[in-house]
Structure formats: C-alpha cells, structure tokens
Image (spheres, rainbow, N blue to C red):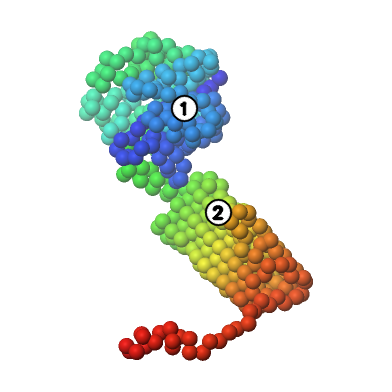
Amino acid sequence: MNNAVILAGGQGKRMKADIPKPMFKVLGEPMLEWVIKACEGADITELCIVTGFMSEVIDEYLNGRYESVIQSERLGTGHAVMQAVPFMKRRSGGNTLVLCGDAPFIDSKTIGNALKLHVSEGNSVTVITAEIENPKGYGRIVRSGDGISCIVEEKDANPQQREIREVNSGAYWFKTDDLLEYLGELTQNNSQGEYYLTDSVFIALNKGRRVNAYISENPDVVLGANDRKGLLELNTAARMAVIEKHLENGVEFTCTDGVVIGRDVVIESGTEIMAGTQLRGNTVIGKDCRIGPNCIIDNCEIKDGVSLNYVQAFESVIEAGVKIGPWVHIRPGSHIMSGVKIGDFVEIKNSTIGEGTAVAHLTYVGDSDVGKKVNFGCGTVTVNYDGIVKSRCEIGDNCFIGCNTNLIAPVKLGKAVYTAAGTTITKDVPDYALAIDRGVVKIKEGYSLRKLKKRLEKE
C-alpha cells in the first residue's frame, strides 16, 4: 500500500505571523493544500500530516480529511517522520512518499513517475530531484554508475561538486519497511543535535541497498519560501504559470498587471481577461467574454459572451450575453439570465433575474425572483429583511418599476405591473395594474424664513 507523510510542522519565524508556514497561501490556497492535491492527483490518498507549531490551525483546516500527528519537539526532519511510525506500520509492505508541506510545486506527474522508477528499479530510496540553473543553497546529488552515491550540502561541497546542477527537492520515495528501519538508526550526532532524514540515504547506501534519484521535468519542485519575499516569488511563479497555460489555450491578456487566476479556474478560448482581475475557486468562464478591468469572480459559472466591468461576483451563475458594471456586486445564490443588463452601483443577492431585464443603477435586489424584460428604475429597493426573517419578492414579466420604489417583502407583482416613482408596495399587485402611493403634499409657506431668520439676518 502506497502512502504519504507530509511534514507540516514548520513555524516560519521569518514570515512574522502566528500561523504554521504551510498554511501561507499561494494563489489563494495554503501551500499544504497544493501538496495534498498533488498526492491526490497521483492516487495517493493514504496521507499522514505531521503538524507542530500551532497544530490546531492545521487540524481545523483538515477537518478530519486525513490523519494527523503532532511533533511536540522540533528535532529535525527525521524526528518529524518518526511521529508517523504507527501510521506507516499499519501500511507495511508498501512504499512511503515523504514531502515537505511548504514546497507547493510538487506535482502529480513527478510523484507518479518517481514511483514508477522506484518500483521498477527496486530502490530502497528514490530521491526526487531537479536540475536548475542556479543551484546555490541546495544539496547536490552526486551520482555513481548505477544510482547516487551521496547528497552533499553546499557548505560541505568541493568546487567540483558545487558545479552540479541536480539538487535535492526534499521529497523521497522509500520502501516503507526500509524507512521504518532507517528511522530507528538515525542519531543526533551533528552540530544541530537533530535527526536528519537525509541521513537515511547514507544508511541505505552503507547497507548496500539501491538508492537512485528521479529528475523531475518540473524544476519548480525544489521551490519553497522562508520569508515574505520568498512567498511573493512563489505566488509570482504560480501566477505566471497559470496565465501562460491560458494563453496557450487561446485566452487573451493585453496586460497581466494585477491579474490573479486560481489554478482550478477554467476559461474558454476567445475570452479577454483585463488588468486587475482576480478569478478564484472553481470559476468557469465561457467563450468570447470580456472580464475586467478590476473584477473579482469567485466560484461562479459565466457563460459565453458576458461582459463584466468592475464587478465582484460570488457563487453565482451568469448566463450568456449579460452585461454588468461598473461597480456591481453579485452576491451568492444569484442567477442572472441571458441578455440581462446591470449598471452602476447595483447589488444583487440570492436572486434570479429573468432574461432581458435591465437594472440600470443604484438598486438593491435581494431574495427576489424577477421575470423577463423587467425594467428597474433608479433607487429601487427590495426590502427583504424585517430584522428577524428574510422574505422574498416576486416580480412578473414585463414589469416597470418606477424610480425609488420600495417593495416590502413578501410581496408579488403580477405581469406587466407599473409602479409610480416613489411608491412603497406592501401588498400584492395584480397583472397589468398601476400601483401609486403618493401622500398629500403639504406646503407651509415661510417655514424656512422663520427657521433660518437669525442666519439670514447676518448675511
């Protein structure tokens, strides 16, 4: 049985924040989640997460998805893996993958191909490596005729070894039973007084067992972050990799300034993504759309030919040919049907807006079911909350809602209802009716002259 142990106990003091380092985000997801998804994508679903600093933060995030163990003392990477010994003993006879929870760019293809090499060669240990242009700071892989002979840290490397471009990623495949054996032989005989997982490579070699390295096609597998600058570099690398993928698929970017796209976002060809746009979660965008500038789209489904300008939309569906913006907020649970036009300073919340409807400006539509070809005048409000419960409004096809109309939910407007400007609707209105609510206007002459007498005398 193949399994993985993910080391996620680091504090990251140089990050200067009170959360575990693997919980810092790259493209909106914790680095730990990147590593977990890489395992899942390689069909490795038996995972043990080794926590340490603020373990409760990671446990809350995992929410029982995977087993976790705590490293109460920080005594090195070998010691961290030791905490997973009971987990591995229950899975003896298989292979164990050890990964760093703060190295987010390990990928499923690398994991799978490294395992194939590991099994086909009968390796005791397979080190996952990469060849990079600037290997400074990384442990070098020194190869022998049929495998690797050692891993040399840069401080211990001679000039010739420092020229080696193949470096250790910190990820390994082990035969599980061999790893359990090696962990029992690790010592603290080093300047730091810690148990180093890399020593297991030397133990295996000294026992005459085969150790080899798999060179990943993805050089970014070695990347991690020790401080905020490093985290920014990870985000930049991930951001540009996603943008390049979409460029190859026919998505247009005239400017990538401020553009951040989650790696699970799907965008069809012919769509243009403009500056300052953030696409998050499982958002899906159709063909020939124009998104931006300065949009935030989170977990939405957007169909073909949609134009969004300065729009924030969350957990909603926007059908084909819709035009929205600028300065519009689409809140969760909304369904904007095809051909709708929504203008500036409009908020839609948990509502269905029917085909061809126009919500021009300065309007709030919440908890409502709106029919086709409705026209909302400026300043319309669906008054959906009485302080205790939220109620829905129903607006029929072809209604014309006059400016500054208040609809006090629950209320229903029938087909082609007109409301006069300034009307407050408190009861249902039948089909084809005009609703007018105009109080008697009282004019008190000379009122302001009396009120402002002292001020006017000074002028």
Label 1 residue SS: strand
Q: Residue 280 versus residue 165: which sits nearer the camera?
A: 280
The residues bearing labels 1 and 2 have C-alpha atoms spaced at a distance of: 31 Å
Q: In which quarter of the image is the N terminus?
A: top right
Q: Which residue is drawn at the image coordinates 47% and 63% (left, top)? A: 293
Residue 428 horizontal/vertical position (percent):
73, 67
Label 2 residue SS: strand
Residue 160 horizontal/vertical position (percent):
24, 28
Q: Quadrant of residue 360?
A: bottom right
Residue 314: assigned label: 2
Q: Residue 321 versus residue 422: which sits nearer the camera?
A: 422
Please give the residue where the numbered disc 1 appears in the rendered image. Answer: 49
In the image, 358: left or right of 55? right
Mark 2 burial class by Cα count in 10 Å: few <14, some 14-19, many 20+: many
* Amino acid at the residue labelled 2: Phe
Q: Quadrant of residue 173?
A: top left
In the image, 151: left or right of 36? left
Q: Quadrant of the C terminus?
A: bottom left
Mark 1 burial class by Cα count in 10 Å: few <14, some 14-19, many 20+: many
Q: Which residue is drawn at the image coordinates 42% and 42% (left, top)? A: 25
Q: Which residue is drawn at the image coordinates 62% and 65% (left, top)? A: 382
- Can residue 99 be seen at all in this image of the molecule? no
In the image, 367: left or right of 45? right
In the image, 356: left or right of 16? right
- Among numbered discs 1 and 2, the one appearing first in the sequence: 1
Q: Quadrant of residue 320?
A: bottom right
